[in-house]
Image (cartoon, grey):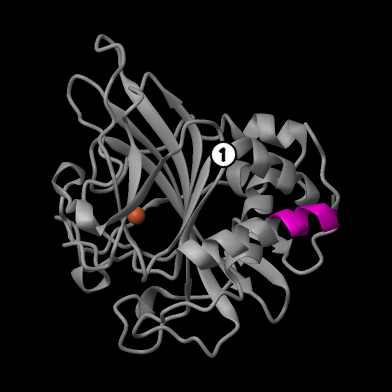
Amino acid sequence: MLRLDLDTALAEINEIKARYTRDRAAFVKGEHLIEILSAFGSTPQSVAEFRKVSEGLPPDPTLDFRKARNGRFCLDTGAGTAYRTEFQPFILTTEEDFVRHDSGKVRRFAEIDANTQLNPTFQALLVFKHLVVDDIEIVQRPGLDYDLDKWICTAFHTRTTTDNEHTGEPALEGVHSDGVDHTMTVLLGSENMTDDSAVTRIHDMRERNATQWYDIDPELAIGQWQHRDFLDTILIVDHERKHSVSTIMRKDPTTSAQRDMLVLFTRKLTQPGHVSHEFDSVAPHPTLPMSVDLLTPARA
Ligand code: FE
């Protein structure tokens, strides 16, 4: 593994930022990202361990083809730290361009565990995303407080499975946004998927919510990418581009197919009146503490 010094890694991040700023979405190859993360504390050993963190995920509260955990982190730009916040329920609504049977429903996920959040590669991903998105000008969402130099980053860790009983849909909701400012999706692993499974498509905001990926308007399709290898990553300016993801299909139909992802949703804190305001605590987690330095990441 090529280990980058901090200046080289920051130059690489600036190149990604330039693409992200221009296109309002960007793809980063996993092997490239691993090199960048090495400047922020990720080690070969932690990379190897990070490949295995998706074993033993518990059931998702509303989707029977998915296992999931979630955890919240406050990115306190002013203080220069990111830290784990206490448990909070989760809600996404149709007003935020998320139209699904569980829109507007309060969901309680199992919590991201210490094994995942203390992994140096996970922590380096938090730092990497923050460095890419923190100072980019974006269309602001209603009800978020853009005057505060704090972000909430909600991490979703999922395994989506297709087997004889279930059809794995990485985005059952079809075309959607995630109710945040910046979405980042990272592949942790996959097994037995066909080559055309789980393609992420990027759409103009005029595309209708809940349109399935096979029904989209090609005039409003901006591009598509596919996570193929470990740590392949897509970044999306969530209130400027919608997205969809195609179904997980099995290469060998006699056994199951699965796809493990880490998704980081970053948004500003909510203002009173926002549906998530009552679930927006920034108190540190009492039993799963974690913090990582955002501004002086020269721990490598
Ligand atoms: Fe999404």
Q: Residue 284 location in percent, x, y? A: 59, 69
Would you name the residue on which mark 1 appears? Answer: 231
Q: Secondary structure at mark 1?
A: loop
Where, by quadrant of the figure, is residue 245 drawn? top left
Q: Relative to residue 121, is residue 240 depicted above or below?
A: below
Q: Is residue 95 visible?
A: yes
Residue sitting nearer the eye, 136 or 82: 136
| Quarter placement of the N terminus | top right
In the figure, is residue 282 to the left or right of 197?
Answer: right
Q: Is residue 286 visible?
A: no
Give the residue displayed 53% in from the left and 31% down from the top.
229
Q: Relative to residue 33, is residue 126 depicted above or below?
A: below
Residue sitting nearer the eye, 100 or 210: 210
Magenta stretch, residue numbers: 6-12
Where, by quadrant of the figure, is residue 209 drawn? bottom left
Type of amino acid at the residue the image marks with label 1: Leu
In the figure, is residue 32 to the left or right of 269?
Answer: right
Mark 1 closeness class: few <14, some 14–19, many ≥20 residues within 10 Å: many
Main secondary structure along the magenta-highlighted residues:
helix
Q: Relative to residue 261, is residue 173 depicted above or below?
A: below
Indicate yes or no whether the magenta region holds residue 11.
yes
